[in-house]
Image (cartoon, rainbow, N blue to C red):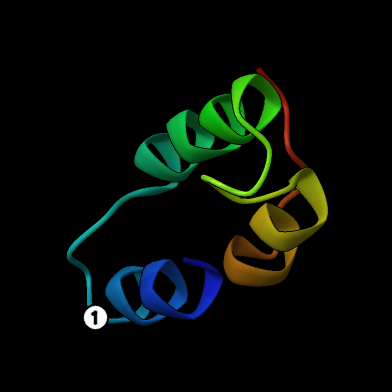
Amino acid sequence: MFEKLKKQYEEGYVTAETLKTWVKINSLKRGRGITQAQYKEITGQTYKE
C-alpha cells in the first residue's frame, strides 16, 4: 500500500488529506493503510489529525 500511495501522491492523484485517511484506516485495521512515519516519508510533513 505504501508504494502505491507514494506514487499516487507524487503524481498528484491523492492529496495529503487523503493520506491522513489511510493513516486512520491503518489504526483501525493494521496493515490496511499506512503508518504516521510512512505519511511523513511520503509528504515530508509530520502527521497531525
Query: Splitting the image into 4 quarters, where does residue 14 fall?
Result: bottom left
Identity of the residue drawn at 46% across and 74% down: 6
Identity of the residue drawn at 52% across and 34% down: 20
Image quarter where the C terminus lies is top right
List x then y, in percent, for residue 46.
Answer: 79, 45
Seen from the viewer's position, the closer of residues 42 and 26 is 26
Q: Is residue 33 above or below residue 25?
A: below
Query: Splitting the image into 4 quarters, where does residue 27 fall?
Result: top right
Q: Which residue is mark 1?
A: 11
Total numbered labels: 1
Identity of the residue drawn at 61% across and 51% down: 34
Q: Is residue 37 left or right of residue 30?
A: right
Looking at the image, the residue that sits furthest to the left is 13
List x then y, in percent, for residue 30.
Answer: 68, 38
Seen from the viewer's position, the closer of residues 6 and 2 is 2
Q: Is residue 29 left or right of residue 45?
A: left
Q: Is residue 26 above or below residue 28?
A: below
Query: Splitting the image into 4 quarters, where does residue 44 fall?
Result: bottom right
Q: Amino acid at mark 1?
A: Glu
Crowding near the residue tagged with mark 1, few <14, some 14–19, many ≥20 C-alpha atoms within 10 Å: few
* Secondary-structure class at tag 1: loop
List x then y, in percent, for residue 25.
Answer: 52, 28
Q: Is residue 7 left or right of residue 1?
A: left
